[in-house]
Image: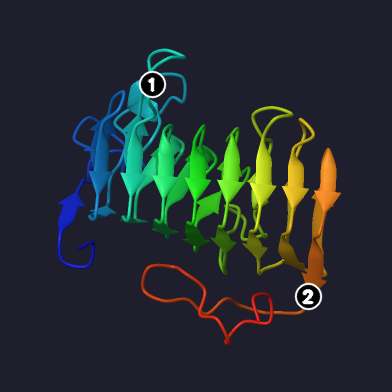
Amino acid sequence: GAKVTCIKGAHDNQGDEYGRGNNAIRCVYLQDGSSVEGFTLSEGTTTATDYETDNGIGGGVLAVKWGAQTVNPIVRNCIITGCVGGRGGAVYGGDCVNCQIVGNEAIANATVRNANVYGCYFAGNRSEKGVLMYFYNALHCSFGAGNVTHSGDPSPSIYHVDSSESMVANCLFLTPGSFDAEHKAAVINCYHRDDFAISNARVERGNVACMAEELLVYDNGAPIIGSNLAVD
């Protein structure tokens, strides 16, 4: 499993302050219908310092889908940590399923960008404009402590969704922060702190503010039932 099987990228010690440079190595590159499952993906870093090319996005995983009729690449049951990219410090593209995404850095925006996330746990990530950005659906996810901007302020848990058809459902937001839906996503059955702000949602239904300070989870990132106010 992910605790004992690793795919390790590399920072460029001769590169910029974030480790990006010609000697940097991304952990995984996925194309249509491919997948990676059950690995720790660590220290993946993009080579380029720009954000507009494939070499500058997706430090841990870059998942590319070429056409509307093709199948999304999948990252499943992985721990993604210590990765750096311009956009999508941990993951850019594809579907993330039951992953722990912890301690990554996006120089421009989004720990995970342009992806679906299902059953994932996010903590300790640095990103200027949100943990998730321009994603499609976020279901059964947990946002724990330490997701911050480069200045140390709480980073928006979600900053811009992909479209009005996007959905955020059954998620836990357990630290101060915000969620800017922009394109009027549906936000359903989510728990969040009472100092957490949701704006521009198309639908808000069944959402509850609570006072839980931090999420207790199993090794796979799933909340421990009975140990969290938000899921008890």
Labelled disc at residue 65 = 1
Identify the residue shown where x is 64% and y is 64%: 172
Q: Residues within 10 Å of mark 1 (few under 14, many from 20)?
A: some
**Residue 147: image location, x then y, percent:** 57, 60
| Front in this rendered view, residue 131 or 200 | 200
21 vs 232, left or right, is left
Q: Is residue 74 above or below residue 54?
A: below
- Image side of residue 27 versus residue 136, left or right: left
**Residue drawn where x is 42% and y is 45% of the image:** 96
Helix or strand or loop: what does disc 2 sit on?
Answer: strand
Mark identifier at residue 210:
2
What's the CA distance linking mark 1 and mark 2? 38 Å
Name the quarter where the N terminus is drawn.
bottom left
Q: Amino acid at mark 1?
A: Lys
Q: Residue at horizontal 75%, vertical 54%?
A: 178
> Callout 2, which amino acid?
Cys
Above or below, 67 against 118 in this view is: above
First reached walking from the N terminus: tag 1 or tag 2: 1
What colour scheme governs how the chains and residues are painted in the rendered image of this protein?
A: rainbow
Q: Position of residue 56 (x, y in %)?
A: 38, 28
Q: Is residue 26 visible?
A: no
